[in-house]
Image (cartoon, rainbow, N blue to C red):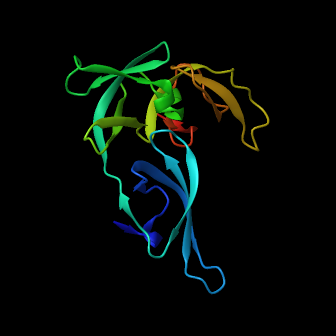
Amino acid sequence: MLEYSEIRERKMIIWEGEPYEVLSSHVFRKQQRKPVNATKLKNLLTGRVAEVSFHVSEKVEEAELGKRKIKFLYEAKGDYWFCEESDPAKRFSIPKDKIGTPAKFLKQDVIVDLMTFEDDDEEEIVIGIQLPIKIEFTIKEAPPSMKGNTAAGGNKVIVLENGTTLNGPLFLEAGQRIIVNTESGEYVERA
């Protein structure tokens, strides 16, 4: 059980019987009243965001999420197909809305973490996936490099092998391998 002041950013909690991720928290005291933790919570099942205040006397249960390694295979008709890392015969799909923004950094054969939650009936519910922080990609398209005004640093739009576009430095060319930070969506370095 977590005390009201232990409910902080990136913690997973059970509130009203469902798993939530704490997006932000702020413990404050209003005049001579007892301290309050004002939080912003994201429901991991529905994606709904709620603002909740926890008082000194309140405690919440920390959510235990299951994690296992799976391999991305392909995308078809809005569904993303995966298989167990150790057994390629065990295939399953996850709808695009469950995956969300990490979908743009998925590429064939990348290993990701499947996040699951067990409800009261001990039924496993898929919450989503968690990508590695850095993934290596090949540049499919990049405008030609131009010499000249690079004193201020320059960027150009590049297209990765999976079709995702992002900004990268002017020296990048098609065919090069680069490393991308999947949390920020930014170019990190050449591979």
Percent x, y of residue 80: 42, 21
* Residue at the extreme top of the image, as rendered: 77
Is 153 situated left or right of 99 in this image?
right
Percent x, y of residue 173: 60, 23
**Residue, x 53% and y 53% (percent of image)?**
41
**Residue, x 68% and y 21% (percent of image)?**
143
**Residue, x 48% and y 27% (percent of image)?**
137
Is 139 situated left or right of 79 in this image?
right
Q: Nearer the viewer, residue 11 or 112?
A: 11
Residue 6, by quadrant, is bottom left
Q: Nearer the viewer, residue 170 or 72?
A: 72
Report if residue 130 is visible in the image: no
Residue 172, by quadrant, is top right
Residue 79, by quadrant, is top left
* Residue at the extreme bottom of the image, as rendered: 32
Report if residue 34 is visible in the image: yes
Percent x, y of residue 150: 75, 38
Q: How many marks?
A: 0
**Residue, x 69% and y 20% (percent of image)?**
144
Quadrant for the N terminus in the image: bottom left
Q: Nearer the viewer, residue 34 or 143?
A: 34
Looking at the image, residue 78 lies above or below residue 11: above
Percent x, y of residue 171: 63, 31
